[in-house]
Amino acid sequence: MQIARVSASNWRNFKTLDFPMTSRLFVVGPNAAGKSNLIDLLRFLGDIAKPGGGLSSALGQRGGLSKVRSLFARNHAGGRLVIEIDLEDGDDRWSYRLSIRGESGGKNRPVVDGESVHFNGELVLDRPNQADRVDSERLTQTHLEQIAANQDFRVLADYFAKVRYFHLVPQIIREPSRYDLPGEFGGEFIAQMNAVPQKTRDAWLRRMRDALRAAVPEFESLDIEVDAAGRPHLMAGYKNWRKNPARQSEAEFSDGTLRLIGLLWTMVSTPANGGVLLLEEPELSLNASVVRKLPAMLAVSQRAKDIQVILSTHAPELLDDEGVHADEILVLRPAKEGTDAELLADIDEAADELDARLPKSDIVQSLIDPRDLSDLVTVGRDTKKK
């Protein structure tokens, strides 16, 4: 199964959002355009569908409905947050639509304003239904999160629950006890690695070791050791003049090495038919030569595991890979009423440059660069001098 189209109204930066998807999508745009917020749309559905999740929990993690609803929502779509996902599963077509509003009567809890599922054009679910009208408390939950209610479309719930997110922060991996952040930022990363059955973990670490030897100078080995307090640590060996390799723990790894280890682990541990993998600026702290290999790395994993990849990036090395096409690049551009999102292949002012085969990174930069940065350059001037 794969996502074929994503549509939304009133989601964070976006008054409206509507774009098709193939096997991968590169999300580009200036700072604060909404790259992270776009990726979070699919994380949000995953948080609703995953075991122990649900609508209330997913919104609570994000500060409530008012924090995720666009500032432009008041005069659009009745102020409702609306998400619609079209999916393809071989010859079958699914569509899931969820509309959320604040409850009336002063409670203002987030409630389901509408929820529907279509399968090959046939309506499978349509809420609110009679049972919802009899017991309005049912509308505080989606059917996506209810095993007893989603039997006819559980394949969708299972698919959304498999959404995976990568944005490891090296400082959090090194000192997880200092930060109160969700585990996907790295606080539980080494513990999650250590929790994998040893035979499987060792096989994955061997594959990672071979990749790291190619990318990290003098790198020799990688394994996990548990200290006297029961805390697992990453341990790497580096070649030097001594007979035995020098050993380092994650506390001594460079940011780039930790980020690369995290990305490699994500690649090897993603299950077959693994749904959607969300990567937020995977190029951070990595050498440019490694960044240039990321599209090929992702392509190999996608072929092997049948996954979709959505990644945000500022790296021109990614966009200029010969395998990356204009219909895989989603360009975000701030406008008067929220951010516009459009595939590079569909942007009229880019057509001539694409036909001329100019570097895609140059074309994108011309679309998203701020026009006047003079105030940025002169910020440190002494205003008292004449």
Image (spheres, rainbow, N blue to C red):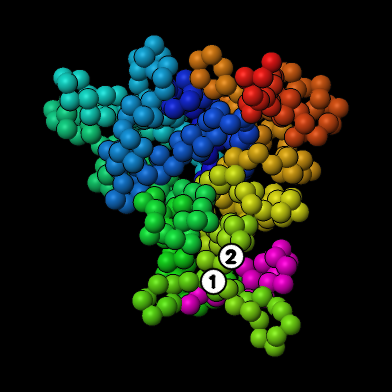
Dot 1: element: strand
User: Which residue is drawn at the image coordinates 36% and 14% (left, top)?
Assistant: 74
Disc sitting over residue 249 in the figure: 1
Residue 68 in the image, given as x and y percentages of width and height: 39, 30
* Horizontal side of residue 134 vs 47, given as left or right: left
Q: Secondary structure at mark 2?
A: loop
Q: Nearer the viewer, residue 56 or 346?
A: 56
**Residue 57: % across, % down:** 29, 42
Q: Mark 2: few, some, or many residues within 10 Å (few <14, many ≥20)?
A: some
Judge left or right: residue 320 versus residue 383.
Answer: right
For residue 151, which quarter of the picture?
Answer: top left
In the rendered view, tell whether residue 235 sits above or below residue 292: below
Residue 333 spot, x, y in % from top left: 60, 23
Tell me the distance, in whole angstroms, between the alpha carbons under discs 1 and 2.
7 Å
- Residue stretch in magenta: 208-225
Disc number for residue 253:
2
Magenta includes 320? no
Pick whichever, 78 or 30, lies toward us. Answer: 30
Query: Which is more toward the observer, 212 or 89?
Result: 212
- Type of amino acid under label 1: Ser
82 sits to left or right of 168: left
Q: Contact (CB < 8 A) between labels 1 and 2?
A: yes
- In the image, residue 210 lies in the stretch drawn in magenta: yes
Query: Going 37% across and 44% down the picture, which residue do you hit?
Result: 47
